[in-house]
């Protein structure tokens, strides 16, 4: 689908999607449709993209769009990142992990890195020469970031990193990984620090399995092992140890909003494709759209999609202005991903038996949507955070 499903559905256009952002969306949509979609089945089969696709995305200006131009970015805002992620969702190449690279990994370096770190890493992230990942989750610590066991012990002018991580997005391809570590295990959250590991330049780093997931097959998700990996002390993010937990908390609202971006994009694509399908599909001598149940279901879904789009647009506007608080970001993450699951499920039902066939896009969406309620903090954790604010 090369057209914007939100426009097809007549959903509200946000004020922040000005001409420049709209042009980026159109360009990103063309890129995904022409460069990525024709090879997407291959990437799904291989369970990962290739580096060539990342380099092409960098050359097209689709990496680090919100990073300053002086560091190789495009000087945009989260609105520009949203346009790119929406294009990925609207075209249906959801496994391309550039959203995490662009609006999770790069901002940590921009906000907490030294000038030397920014000049060293951001331009290479913008070209795709470096592919970013962030290693938070451990086998024994999922949403509990305070339970991290990975150690970073100071050893002269180096840190020695020991531990393991799992469920790491971009894990097979990433060669710049922000690792959540404990520099002082006795201090709990205040003993957490973020370390940058350039995997091409260290010994003792090992990639484990490319994990066999239900959906998002083309997005490599891995186990990572750090066996006394030595990195320079200059690879600490921030001017001192123990700031990692605060840094994570400050950046989580954007991560959670980005999950909402993927959710609303898939909602719109699923609904637009399903409306087309029920207009063409015949049952009992008439189009499926002509049945009252179909009309009622689609009326409900379009209403909820409209509410979701309005809420999402407001969250992005607030975020661009610096006013998106963690509670509202948690609401966006949980509610939009829940709605995504509901809409995709209802749309699959309207496809009947064909919806269960992998040749129909709705089947892949059904698989790919499920993890949205888990990563970035489970939706149960989101409700806990919201509940604490009451």
Image (spheres, rainbow, N blue to C red):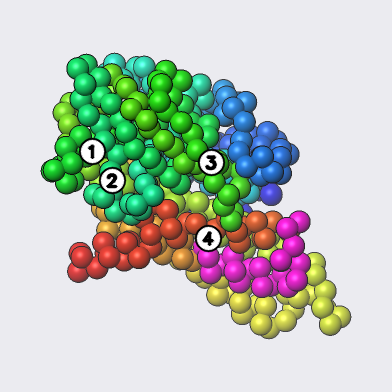
Q: Contact (CB < 8 A) between labels 4 and 2?
A: no
Q: Disc 4 vs disc 3: which is toward the camera?
A: 3
Q: Inspect the magenta stretch and tell me whether residue 349 lies in it.
A: yes
233 to 195, vertically: above or below: above
**374 left or right of 56 in image:** left
Q: Is residue 21 visible?
A: no
**Residue 124 placed where, x, y %?**
45, 20
Residue 227 found in image quarter = top left
Question: Residue 212 at what x, y percent from top left?
Answer: 58, 49
Query: Which residue carries the number 2 mark?
Result: 148
Mark sitting earlier along the chain (4/3): 3
Residue with the mark numbered 4: 370
**Residue range (magenta):** 340-359
Mark found first going from the N terminus, 2 or 3: 2
Question: Which disc is residue 209 wearing?
Answer: 3
Badge 1 is on which residue? 182
Q: Say few, some or many: other residues with alpha carbon within 10 Å of mark 4 (under 14 / 14 to 19 / 20 or more).
A: some
């Amino acid at each position: 689908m090369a057209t914007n499903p939100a426009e097809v559905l007549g959903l509200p256009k946000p004020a922040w999607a000005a001409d420049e952002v709209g042009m980026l969306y159109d360009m990103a949509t063309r890129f995904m449709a022409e460069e990525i979609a024709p090879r997407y089945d291959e990437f799904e089969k291989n369970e990962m993209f290739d580096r060539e696709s990342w380099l092409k995305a960098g050359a097209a200006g689709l990496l680090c769009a919100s990073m300053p131009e002086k560091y190789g970015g495009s000087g945009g805002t989260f609105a520009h990142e949203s346009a790119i992620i929406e294009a990925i969702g609207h075209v249906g190449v959801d496994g391309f992990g550039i959203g995490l690279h662009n609006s999770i990994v790069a901002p940590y370096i921009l906000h907490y890195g030294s000038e030397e770190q920014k000049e060293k890493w951001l331009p290479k992230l913008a070209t795709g020469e470096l592919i970013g990942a962030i290693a938070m989750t451990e086998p024994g610590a999922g949403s509990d970031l305070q339970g991290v066991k990975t150690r970073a012990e100071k050893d002269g002018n180096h840190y020695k990193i020991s531990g393991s991580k799992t469920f790491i997005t971009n894990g097979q391809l990433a060669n710049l990984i922000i690792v959540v570590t404990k520099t002082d295990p006795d201090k709990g959250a205040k003993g957490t620090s973020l370390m940058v590991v350039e995997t091409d330049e260290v010994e003792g780093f090992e990639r484990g399995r490319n994990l066999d997931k239900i959906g998002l097959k083309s997005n490599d998700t891995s186990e990572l092992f750090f066996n006394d990996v030595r990195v320079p002390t200059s690879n600490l993010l921030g001017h001192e140890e123990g700031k990692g937990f605060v840094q994570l908390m400050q950046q989580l609202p954007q991560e959670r909003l980005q999950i909402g971006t993927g959710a609303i994009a898939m909602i719109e694509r699923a609904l637009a494709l399903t409306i087309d399908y029920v207009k063409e599909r015949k049952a009992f001598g008439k189009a499926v759209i002509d049945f009252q149940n179909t009309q009622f279901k689609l009326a409900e879904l379009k209403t909820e999609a409209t509410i979701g789009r309005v809420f999402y647009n407001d969250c992005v506007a607030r975020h661009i202005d610096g006013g998106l608080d963690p509670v509202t970001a948690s609401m966006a993450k949980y509610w939009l991903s829940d709605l995504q699951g509901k809409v995709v499920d209802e749309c699959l039902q309207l496809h009947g038996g064909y919806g269960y066939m992998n040749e129909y896009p709705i089947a892949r969406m059904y698989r790919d949507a499920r993890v949205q309620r888990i990563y970035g903090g489970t939706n149960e954790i989101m409700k806990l955070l919201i509940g604490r604010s009451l």
